[in-house]
């Protein structure tokens, strides 16, 4: 981790959608260069929490970015500092991959300024990082689901955000590209970017995250070092299974053993 300075804080965060409480009384603090994993069962509120941190859903409570209320930033200011990758992002137009990735620079350039050398270099780095150079001229609509997911992540990376919010970025990827994406998130963190990532793969969460925040029924249930959280009895109960945490060749592995609901 490159710094200990706190980049993002949330206090008393709550969200109600269609008058139904979805999140209640969430507190968190994220340091520069830290990877925080959001875990929890389906419907726990992980995606809503991520969207609240990106100011994409109305929320009560307090969110601060770099010591300043998030509401005080202009939309352009937020877009320059926060990169958000939703789950199952779609692309309607047959843009070449390189053009799609270049859209990630718009918060910095505006819609009319021509790209400079720094913009082109950021796009090239994003393409290279996610092994998309051979596909850069292919229409996004002709990509496989895994290739499209990598292209959408590359678009976010091209914006060089200080805070990266990603929702299940490895869903649908083969094992090699799952590792490549998680290694890239760790590389970004080493350079000072703060990352909040929603994960269902608990082994990847244990291996690549600095801390885990376990959400259950819209509330923070546990937070701490990955293995401490995953070994806690409350974690298994939240998922309705008994979690086995082992080590193979020095790397953590998390497996469900028994269905506690049987």
Image: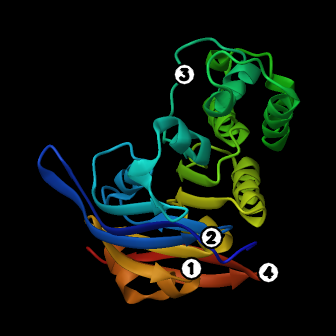
Q: Specify whether residue 240 is in view.
A: no
Q: Relative to 135, is 218 above or below?
A: below
Quarter placement of the N terminus: bottom right
| Residue under label 1 | 226
Labels 1 and 2: the sequence-earlier one: 2
Labels 2 and 3: the sequence-earlier one: 3
Nearest to the observer: residue 106 or residue 90: 106
| Residue under label 3 | 91
Labels 3 and 1: the sequence-earlier one: 3
Quarter placement of the C terminus: bottom left
Q: Specify whether residue 115 is in view.
A: yes
200 displayed left or right of 218: right
Q: Nearer the viewer, mark 3 or mark 4?
A: 3
Q: What is the spatial separation of the Cα atoms under label 1 and label 2, in whole angstroms?
A: 7 Å
Secondary structure of the residue carrying tag 2 is loop
Q: Nearer the viewer, mark 4 or mark 2?
A: 2
Q: What is the spatial separation of the Cα atoms under label 2 and label 3, in whole angstroms?
A: 29 Å
Secondary structure of the residue carrying tag 3 is loop
Labels 4 and 2: the sequence-earlier one: 2
Percent of width and height locating residue 191:
78, 61
| Residue under label 4 | 249
Residues under numbered marks 3 and 4 in contact, where contact means CB atoms less than 8 Å apart? no
Labels 4 and 1: the sequence-earlier one: 1
Q: What is the spatial separation of the Cα atoms under label 3 and label 4, in whole angstroms?
A: 40 Å
Q: What is the spatial separation of the Cα atoms under label 3 and label 1, in whole angstroms?
A: 34 Å
Q: Residue at x 70, y 57 (%)?
A: 185
Secondary structure of the residue carrying tag 1 is helix
Q: Relative to 58, is 40 above or below?
A: below
Q: Residue at x 79, y 22 (%)?
A: 115
Residues under numbered marks 1 and 2 in contact, where contact means CB atoms less than 8 Å apart? yes
198 displayed left or right of 186: left
């Amino acid at each position: 981790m490159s710094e200990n300075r706190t980049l993002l804080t949330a206090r008393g965060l709550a969200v109600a959608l269609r008058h139904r409480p979805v999140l209640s009384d969430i507190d968190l603090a994220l340091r520069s260069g830290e990877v925080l994993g959001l875990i929890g069962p389906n419907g726990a509120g992980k995606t809503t929490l991520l969207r609240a941190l990106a100011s994409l859903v109305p929320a009560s409570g307090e969110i601060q970015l770099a010591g300043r209320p998030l509401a005080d930033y202009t939309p352009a200011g937020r877009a320059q500092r926060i990169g958000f990758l939703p789950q199952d992002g779609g692309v309607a137009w047959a843009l070449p991959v390189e053009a799609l990735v270049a859209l990630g620079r718009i918060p910095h350039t505006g819609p009319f300024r021509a790209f400079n050398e720094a913009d082109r270099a950021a796009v090239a780095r994003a393409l290279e990082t996610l092994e998309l150079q051979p596909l850069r001229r292919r229409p996004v609509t002709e990509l496989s689901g895994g290739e499209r997911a990598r292209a959408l992540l590359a678009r976010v990376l091209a914006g060089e955000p200080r805070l990266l919010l990603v929702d299940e970025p490895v869903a649908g990827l083969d094992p090699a590209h799952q590792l490549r994406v998680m290694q890239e998130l760790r590389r970004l963190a080493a350079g000072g970017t703060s990352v909040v990532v929603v994960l269902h793969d608990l082994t990847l969460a244990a291996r690549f995250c600095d801390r885990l925040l376990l959400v259950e029924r819209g509330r923070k249930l546990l937070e701490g070092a990955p293995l401490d959280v995953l070994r806690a009895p409350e974690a298994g109960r939240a998922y309705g299974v008994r979690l086995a945490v082992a080590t193979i060749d020095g790397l953590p592995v998390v497996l469900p053993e028994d269905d506690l609901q049987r």
